[in-house]
């Protein structure tokens, strides 16, 4: 069994290497912890924080002792990703390493570990579908299929206009509102960056959200079920309808 799985994985890697260079770089950079240079992602490309973000860098560093600058690696990588349109080229990672005064490999280790960091290009609106069990039971695969079919892309690809990409994320922590998606909005850089949950979605609803984003609108986030209030039950509460009684306390003065 293990031999068959290993052989299958080796075949997949070989097929990636047989693809054109740009596609191979994209696939390996995202799916595996490899980096292959490409015209828009190589160490010698200049990259630095914008003037506006340099002040944010100083603020982030101020939260940590001066001898623990490396603790700021995650928020600094997040800021760099926001500035760079939703993904992290290796030159941005090197810039972060320089700021926190560590070897670049220490930054690469973080960027390749956390799924929140994208090491290949994404759309200005990066749509993430929750794929964990509660959402899957509630139809997350249909949600993903509706998005991919409507946009004409595969998972991990970017639409030709550069606006949308679709990915999967494990548990978003809102299981009571399953199924759900997240929209990471990189359309206005780090100043206008937003990361919003859209809950209780349907295939038709996610297509509607996409079209509103395409028009530059900001669809309301949160539950998309008009019969629910946030994570409350559909149709309203059936229990705990009144004010709860205050807790019983001992008479501490009598002790």
Image (cartoon, rainbow, N blue to C red):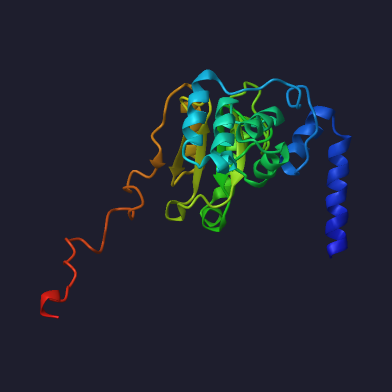
| Residue 254 x %, y % | 10, 79
Q: Tell me what residue is drawn at x 78 percent, y 40 percent.
A: 34
Q: Would residue 121 be found to the left or right of residue 4 on screen?
A: left
| Residue 39 x %, y % | 77, 22
Q: Tell me what residue is drawn at x 45 percent, y 41 percent.
A: 198
| Residue 171 x %, y % | 54, 52
In the rendered image of this protein, does residue 161 appear above or below residue 77? above
Q: Name which quarter of the figure residue 221 lies in.
A: top left
| Residue 67 x %, y % | 57, 42
* Total labels drawn: 0
For residue 205, say whether it is visible.
Answer: yes
Residue positioned most to the left = 254
In the rendered image of this protein, does residue 58 appear above or below residue 235? above
Q: Quadrant of the C terminus?
A: bottom left
For residue 208, say whether it is visible.
Answer: no
In the rendered image of this protein, does residue 169 appear above or below residue 35? below
Viewer-side residue, 135 vs 50 = 50
Q: Would residue 93 be found to the left or right of residue 218 on screen?
A: right
Q: Tell me what residue is drawn at x 17 percent, y 73 percent.
A: 248
Viewer-side residue, 235 vs 55 = 55
Q: Name which quarter of the figure residue 25 lies in.
A: top right
Q: Would residue 4 be found to the left or right of residue 250 on screen?
A: right
């Amino acid at each position: 069994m293990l031999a068959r799985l290993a052989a299958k994985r080796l075949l997949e890697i070989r097929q990636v290497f047989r693809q054109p260079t740009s596609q191979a770089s994209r696939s390996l950079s995202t799916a595996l912890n490899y980096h292959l240079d490409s015209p828009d992602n190589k160490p010698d490309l200049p990259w630095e924080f914008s003037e506006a973000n340099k002040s944010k860098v100083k603020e982030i560093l101020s939260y940590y002792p001066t001898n623990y600058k490396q603790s700021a690696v995650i928020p600094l990588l997040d800021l760099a990703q926001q500035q760079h349109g939703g993904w992290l080229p290796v030159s941005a990672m090197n810039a972060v390493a320089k700021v926190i005064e560590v070897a670049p490999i220490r930054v690469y280790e973080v960027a390749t570990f956390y799924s929140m960091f994208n090491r290949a290009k994404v759309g200005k609106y990066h749509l993430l579908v929750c794929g964990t069990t509660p959402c899957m039971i509630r139809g997350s695969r249909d949600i993903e299929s509706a998005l991919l079919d409507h946009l004409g892309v595969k998972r991990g690809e970017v639409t030709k206009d550069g606006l949308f990409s679709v990915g999967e994320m494990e548990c978003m922590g809102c299981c009571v509102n399953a199924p759900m998606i997240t929209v990471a909005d990189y359309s206005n850089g780090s100043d206008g960056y937003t990361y919003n949950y859209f809950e209780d979605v349907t295939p038709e609803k996610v297509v509607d959200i996409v079209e509103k984003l395409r028009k530059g609108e900001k669809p309301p986030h949160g539950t998309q079920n008009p019969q629910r209030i946030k994570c409350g039950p559909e149709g309203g509460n059936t229990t705990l309808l009144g004010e709860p009684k205050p807790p019983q306390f001992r008479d501490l003065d009598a002790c």
